[in-house]
Image (spheres, coloured by chain):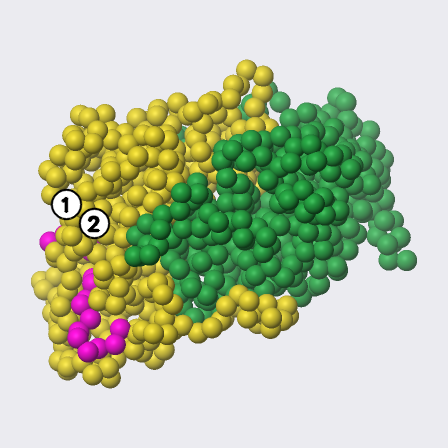
Chain colours: A yellow, B green
Amino acid sequence: MTEMPARAADVVTARPATAVDAADAAAAPPRPLDPPPRLLMGPGPVNAHPRVLRASSVPLIGQYDPAMTAYMAETSALYRTVFGTANRETLLVNGTSRAGIEAALVSLVAPGERVLVPVFGRFGHLLVEIAKRAGAQVHTIEAEWGTVFDPAAIAEAVRRVRPRLLAMVHGDTSTTMLQPLDGLGAVCAEYDALLYADVTASLGGNVFAADAWGIDAATAGLQKCLGGPSGTAPVTFSPRAVEVIGGRRQIEEGLREAGDVENELRIGSNYFDMAMLFDYWGDRRLNHHTEATSALYGARECAALLVEEGMEAAVRRHELHGSALAAGVRGLGLEVFGDQRHRMNNVVAALIPDGVSDAAVRGGMLDEFGIEIGTSFGPLRGRVWRIGAMGYNARKDAVLTTLAALEQVLRGAGAKVPVGGGVEAAREAYQGAAA
Amino acid sequence: MTEMPARAADVVTARPATAVDAADAAAAPPRPLDPPPRLLMGPGPVNAHPRVLRASSVPLIGQYDPAMTAYMAETSALYRTVFGTANRETLLVNGTSRAGIEAALVSLVAPGERVLVPVFGRFGHLLVEIAKRAGAQVHTIEAEWGTVFDPAAIAEAVRRVRPRLLAMVHGDTSTTMLQPLDGLGAVCAEYDALLYADVTASLGGNVFAADAWGIDAATAGLQKCLGGPSGTAPVTFSPRAVEVIGGRRQIEEGLREAGDVENELRIGSNYFDMAMLFDYWGDRRLNHHTEATSALYGARECAALLVEEGMEAAVRRHELHGSALAAGVRGLGLEVFGDQRHRMNNVVAALIPDGVSDAAVRGGMLDEFGIEIGTSFGPLRGRVWRIGAMGYNARKDAVLTTLAALEQVLRGAGAKVPVGGGVEAAREAYQGAAA
């Protein structure tokens, strides 16, 4: 572990290839892109579906081309299905999943307003961080890592804090836990709070029903169960959320005309101003950023794949391969971390056995087999491996290959491993599911 | 013009294909992506280079894979050459060019600090807008559209306002003007101001020398002279800028450990916190966003293409094709807008003749020839066409094809056009340059 950077929890090999080294080396043109083949079985990013990669290389069109407007409209419609919503304002933010979170929070919450964040892992802390940057008064409640909240405890906190916004992580990959959200919408409606859900890690692989659950805003990313590259954040906002954001709407300097007044309640970011993004995606197509067309093509393809498969079937697929993976991990003699009744379908945390080197195992998986698995953050850093089967990688061959390789690497690292135990247990799980 | 949305200046055809229509239609999987072939000869976005498109579809690797760290280092090194800098902190922001602008301004300027923006077009107003959102006290000076500032006027304003930051647009596509920046670095250094340049529209097609000109921060996008898709913002920060940003640095909630204090001067955005991005791109590889790998592959290829060609050769190429385009536009009997001594190499604004319909001409170009040209914003909306030759499209065939089509469409729209006048004038310009 000593060679590893202080906190880059997912680094397997720390070699001194830094920006400055390369600059010193030369400004010569680099070799053509030829990344090593990798099977990405960590907590995400995962391998993108080949159809999504191909979509990313389709020739560009102009941002106000009628064909572009039609693709944007199709993309909105597809993500309505993916989010389980009829929300008109269902669109993309051009940035990673974290950009989607910031766009939602900075647009929904004015400085000084109260935000309640129930924290059950690293990504709850991220919501706290981003809400604070937006100037919110942030209140938290915490659950032990590896558990989720009883919804009654969240309801009680809402009553006590009376937040403008309840901000929830749905699935937190740092602990693999999936927080039940059903019922919180009614609580929020009663106390006039908005309900936001970060579904980056869960969407597409676990049941999510924005409208049925009374979710006012949800944001995601492509690099987990959606099977695409990081860099685009699908987002959706309820009519109630749109109304709140509308109160802070203003026309941009340089586009403002006689009669448009400057709004003193304006949102603290231009790029993440959802009111402007609604105007850009809406009928007026009001100029804002230049839509990232290649990214939109990819995001559209991710959603098309899910809609073709059917959302229920996609969730069942993640459940099947996640269960087989968990069975296989146990079959290798490893203990699974966290309350398994509330585990996300798409990722399993395995406790690292005493005396086995985290770095040696992850390094062996990557160097010998081209397979990436992860460790975690904070209290779980170096204590668990996070192994995922999601998006394009929620497949039997990916699960069995990972288990077979892990058996070899664990044995090489000095662990006692049942011969063939991981693959055998996974096979049984698949057979049981098929029966 | 009546059919056009109020302010979507670049819309050619306003048809009611909106998000809500599509939602009402169905959630059925859409047809495979098959955008119409387009030659994008407006002010950008332009067609991406085929090598960049292919790079965008290369398989993914993990964000802390040693190969990824090496690609990030190569990308930094390449963009040092593109920006003309030795700045260690030369990296990518995962968002469009506007994201790069916001990241620079929100990281460099604390609320209440003074920012001076000389405005000579629409994108100066955008800097005002974004700086205001960051809480800055914004002061402006204005130049008539179609002109640039005498550097002495900017120096005088710096003396008067004493800003923390002088924020300049280098090339403003709304007017096609290129503001001379050489000399402003010395002025800023004298009055302890930082100098920021938005080089989105100029970089790669016009001389830019960050270090020689004393630029403290510059941000760009891929969709103009760099020949890539929108969605990634290359940025560079001088050691002086890094020091200022370092004073506002803090470790993120959830990664913070004993001994790390919360910084009360923290930057008002998490996603755009350049101090965190420096930590993510630097030796520590501290966790922040999940790098948009496909976008990084594309951005790296854009820079590789320029470095292979040589920056001087790339600027000369833009100058050649821009000059031929301007000659051709005049050869069609159109007047060129703006002070031509200060025109950007990569875009020409042609005054729309009296009695000729802007919408009919742009619609005809798109519908009949698949060629996109643009109009402009504000006082130039419907008054000029903006025609660009940049990035992959800074090519003779693209210029001549555009002029040949424009002749036909102009004649159809009732303009008196010299037969073959555009192509002939461009041919002469090419021959003159070759002689």
Residue at (16, 31) in percent of width and height: A160
Q: Is A75 positioned to the left or the right of A57 in the image?
A: left
The residue labelled by disc 2 is A120
Instruction: Give the answer, above or below, for where B160 lies relative to A174.
Output: above
Could you say where residue A18 lies in the image, as x and y percent from the top left? 50, 68
Could you say where residue A136 lies in the image, as x and y percent from the top left? 33, 35
Instruction: Give the answer, above or below, for where A369 lies relative to B316.
Output: below
Q: Which mark is residue A17?
A: none
Amino acid type, label 1? Phe
Residue A406 in sight from this viewpoint: yes
Q: Which segment is the magenta one?
A: A341-358
Residue at (84, 52) in percent of width and height: B430
Query: What is the C-alpha distance between the residues marked 2 and 1?
Result: 8 Å
Instruction: Give the answer, above or below, for where A285 lies relative to B248.
Output: above
Could you say where residue B374 lies in the image, as x and y percent from the top left? 65, 36
Residue at (32, 59) in percent of width and height: A44
The residue labelled by disc 1 is A149
